[in-house]
Image (tube, grey):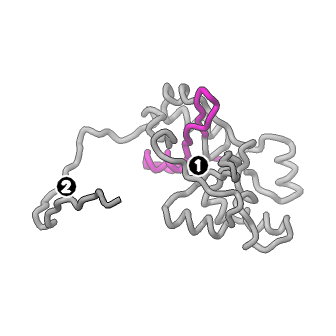
C-alpha cells in the first residue's frame, strides 16, 4: 500500500478568490427526484447493526454527521430504519418503560421504524418523477423515508425528508399517519407514538 505519492500543493497566500459555478441552478420541487436520492450503486448505504445500543448509535451518527441509518441483521438484511430525532425523543424512554428496562439497555431495534411499516417506490418511477412528487408521496404515507427498489426487488436507494429539506433549503414537515386501528389503539391506550 505504499504506491501513493504526495500531491504538489501551493501556499494559500497565492489563492485569491473562490471559483463559483454560476450555471448550477438551485434545486426546486420540479427538479428530478434522483437529485435527492441516495443511490446505493454509487454510495454505500449508511447501516447499523440491529444489536447496537441507542447511545452508541447516537454517538456514531453525531460523529459522522448523519441523521438516519438503515438497521440490518447479522445477514445484512434490512429490518428497519432509525433516525436521530427518534433516538433523542421520548420514544426511547417509552420503550424502556414498556420493556421494564433501563434506558441504556434499549437497542436501535426498539425504536426503529420496522421494514414492514416502510414503503418503497420502483427506481424507474423515481427516475421519471420530480422532488415534489416524492414529497407528496412521503406526506401521503406519513413517512420520513422512502426506499427505492430495482427490477430485482433489491433496495437500491433511499430518499429522506431531511435531505429534501436540506437540498431545497426549506423546512419539510411530515406528519406521521396512523395506518390501522391498532396504531390508534396503541397511541390512546398504550401511550406509544406512531412509528
Describe the element under mark 1 as helix, strand or loop.
loop
Return the residue at label 1.
173
Describe the element under mark 2 as helix, strand or loop.
loop
Q: Residues within 10 Å of mark 2 (few under 14, many from 20)?
A: few
Asked if residue 155 lies in the magenta stretch, the reply is yes
Q: Is residue 36 left or right of residue 74?
A: left
Q: Position of residue 89 (x, y in %)?
A: 67, 64
Cα separation between marks 1 and 2: 34 Å
Point out the stretch of residues depicted in magenta: 147-175
Asked if residue 129 lies in the magenta stretch, the reply is no
Q: Is residue 26 left or right of residue 38?
A: left
Total labels drawn: 2
- Name which of mark 1 and mark 2 comes first in the sequence: 2
Outermost residue toward the front in this view: 2
Q: Nearer the viewer, residue 191 or 87?
A: 87
Q: Position of residue 123 (x, y in %)?
A: 55, 30
Q: Position of residue 22 (x, y in %)?
A: 23, 42
The residue at the point 17 percent across, 60 percent down is 8
The residue at the point 55 percent across, 35 percent down is 134
Find residue 77 and report its image quarter: top right
The residue at the point 43 percent across, 46 percent down is 167
Q: Nearer the viewer, residue 133 or 52?
A: 52
The residue at the point 59 percent across, 26 percent down is 151
Figure check: 133 above or below 56: above
- Which quarter of the image is occupied by the N terminus? bottom left
Q: Position of residue 5 (x, y in %)?
A: 24, 59
Figure check: 64 above or below 31: below
Return the residue at label 2.
18
Amino acid at each position: 500500500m505504499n504506491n501513493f505519492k504526495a500531491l504538489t500543493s501551493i501556499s494559500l497566500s497565492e489563492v485569491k478568490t473562490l471559483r463559483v459555478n454560476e450555471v448550477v441552478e438551485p434545486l426546486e420541487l420540479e427538479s428530478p427526484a434522483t437529485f435527492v436520492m441516495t443511490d446505493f450503486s454509487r454510495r454505500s448505504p449508511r447501516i447499523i447493526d440491529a444489536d447496537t445500543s441507542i447511545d452508541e448509535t447516537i454517538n456514531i451518527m453525531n460523529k459522522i454527521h448523519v441523521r438516519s441509518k438503515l438497521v440490518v441483521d447479522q445477514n445484512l438484511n434490512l429490518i428497519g430504519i432509525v433516525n436521530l430525532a427518534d433516538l433523542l425523543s421520548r420514544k426511547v424512554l417509552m420503550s424502556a418503560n414498556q420493556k421494564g428496562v433501563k434506558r441504556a439497555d434499549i437497542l436501535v431495534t426498539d425504536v426503529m421504524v420496522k421494514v414492514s411499516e416502510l414503503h418503497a417506490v420502483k427506481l424507474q418511477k423515481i427516475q421519471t418523477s420530480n422532488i415534489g412528487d416524492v414529497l407528496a408521496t412521503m406526506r401521503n404515507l406519513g413517512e420520513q423515508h422512502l426506499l427505492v427498489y430495482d427490477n430485482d426487488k433489491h433496495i437500491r436507494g433511499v430518499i429522506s425528508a431531511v435531505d429534501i429539506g436540506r437540498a431545497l433549503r426549506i423546512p419539510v414537515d411530515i406528519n406521521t399517519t396512523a395506518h390501522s386501528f391498532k396504531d390508534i389503539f396503541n397511541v390512546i391506550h398504550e401511550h406509544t407514538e406512531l412509528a
